[in-house]
Amino acid sequence: MSYRLGTMPVARWVTVLLLVCILAVVPGCNRSKRKTPPRPRQADTKPLVIRDVPAPLRGTVGAEATIRGVRPTLVSGIGFVVGLKGTGGLTLPEQYAAHIEREMGLNGISASNRNMGPFLSGRSPRELLRDPNTAAVIVQAAVPPGANEGDSFDIYVRAINATSLEGGILWTTDLRIGPPSAFGDPQARILAKARGPIFLNPFSEPGSETTGVRKTVGRVLDGGTVTFPTLIEVILDNPSHQRARQITSAINAAFPRGPGDPEQIARGKDDSLIQVRVPHRYSDRREDFVELIKHLPIDQSFPEAYARRFAMAMKSDPYLARELSWGLEAIGERSKPFLADLYDAPEAGPRLAALRAGARLNDPRAVKALRDIALNGEAALRTDAILLLSQIDGGPSIDDTLRSLLESPLLSVRVEAYEGLMRRAVESQKRRLALAQARARSEARITSGGSRDQIEAFARSFIPAGTLYGVSRELVEGKFFLDRVPFGEPLIYVTQQGEPRIVVFGEDPELVTPMLVSAWSDRLMLAADNKGDPIRLYYRDDIQRRTVTMESAPKDLTEFIRFLAREPTPGDPRPGLGLGYAEVVGALYALNDDHGTLAAFATESDRLLAELLQTAQPNRIEVRPEAPGDEVTLIAIDDPREEVVDRSKSGLVRERRSLLVPVNPPAEPVPGSENEPGDPAMGTQGAGNSAPKPIGRRE
């Protein structure tokens, strides 16, 4: 007899249960079990990039990353100049005319507008372009790397339809990346704006072909303003979020945010890109800041170990001294004990490299060695030593040394000593003003004071006479700085970039009589028949149609400079000619050239044109991408040395401009004659001597 469970025999149920158990343990038979995940594909890996760097420099930022954006950015625009002396209004190529007319129209200039002032009211843009006192110009500049919004720079201007830019004032002009583009052409990003009075190089006779100076080119000193900041980029060779964070932290630790910095200096964007701002305190040393980043150790846990390594390597590998000194300076205060042992190193390379780092770290132990070089070193090293010495807060002994160098027979030494003393005087003035403001706040006399920028601007514009530094400064009519250095032989030193300055050396320089001085085709004339006679003056202003005559012009050279720039007003009716900076410099040059003063004449080398030429070489420039993923492009660039429009048929001659401004180059001496020069770097301008060769400021 068989037993049933329901209608199925028990034996059959046992068989079914056994089959179910077998299926449960056999792989692949359980359809309810998850499928085995697929094996992961092997990720594509790029080989690590390992740079071939000297062993002492391993572990620095430059050993593992590329720093981009360290060259100036070329910007250009098409501008409009007013205030010429009847030398503009020539035929203008249509592409430039259409662009400027459109820009004028956007600014409300039209024949129907009667509320634009006497010069603009009721005149169309086309009529303005044909006015002989206006001109269209090509505007070019090199925006410094890492420029922040509001930073200023010099502008280079070339005339399109004028034979001379004398007296011109540039209207506000947009500056875009790359070459100048007219309306209808591809428009690049606007980085800056430019405006201001045009400075012409006055150091040659009009029409002279020996110096290469043209009246159709000029510059606007400090006339450019950055409107869109540019950043320096650190790009890792091997992407890594951890390494990018370490580099970002190292940069921010070495260069903490200070006054004038809108945010922290470095900011990581991803695993391979770090964006870096130039700190405000390095705005005058941008190239140095890049070198410091490049040689900064990434590991900041024990910087003394890197300082010791760098110092030892400077002794064992002197050829690396320059690079290692950047690393020691980047480490900062903790490098000083290791630098001190190198100040007396037997080899010149390590010794000078250590002194440079020590001076910039404000180490007073570097003063003695730098003073010895400044006073008695080789001529090629003295100006560098003076510059470094002036950067140390070492007390009155440094000021005494610099003042003694103001009477040096070497022109380059005198000017560098003046520059150093003026920097120290300005810094002292800033500290004094900031302290006075803080004291007034603490005594509740004021609730708010001038901003940092206002304090800095005031400190730079006025330095009283009789201070420890021996130099003084005043702002003349808001046009330029007039600096006095009452030491040594008479000298007039003028600047051609940055802040417009006229520096007068000597205790009491005066105009000499008898004299006969003529400038600008007899528009300015000075005359005195006998020694001691009053100086008669004649000046004709063709733009304002006025004539000024005087029977007794100022004889004191400093007062004469003030007189040239002063503009008589009802509140200050003292006489003056109202000349701009370029015109004042031109008048002083004519005075020097016609032996109306015993002062020698010197000027700076032309750094602006050199920067433009370097940025534009070799006739094509690289335009950085404006958005991630964009490609870098190369575009042709306009040579700033060439005429915009070849007007040789109308009398203009195409010339190239020298990178060094000539100032009265001496005539070839006759061997054995009294005029054979001795020291080529310095001389006193007299009735029978030519002015010294110009010097170039230390770059």
Image: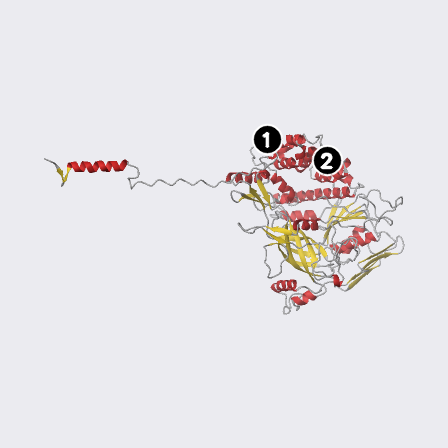
Residue 597 lies, in percent from the top left, at 83, 51
Identify the residue under disc 2: 370
Residue 251 lies, in percent from the top left, at 58, 40
The vertical placement of 227 against 678, above or below, is below
Q: Nearer the viewer, residue 439 or 80?
A: 80
The image quadrant that residue 53 belongs to is top right
Mark 2 lies on a secondary structure that is: helix
Q: Which mark is residue 305?
A: 1
Residue 99 lies, in percent from the top left, at 63, 62
Evaluate whether residue 85 shows in this view.
Answer: no
Residue 167 lies, in percent from the top left, at 73, 59
In the rendered image, the quadrant that contains the N terminus is top left
The vertical placement of 608 against 468, above or below, is below
Q: Nearer the viewer, residue 210 or 395?
A: 210
How far apart are the alpha carbons under marks 1 and 2? Answer: 27 Å
The image quadrant that residue 571 belongs to is bottom right
Foreground mark, 1 or 2, reads: 1
Evaluate whether residue 454 shows in this view.
Answer: yes
Q: Is residue 370 left or right of residue 5?
A: right
The single residue placed furthest to the left in the displayed view is: 1
In the rendered image, the quadrant that contains the C terminus is top right
The vertical placement of 325 against 545, above or below, is above
Circle 1: residue type: Ala
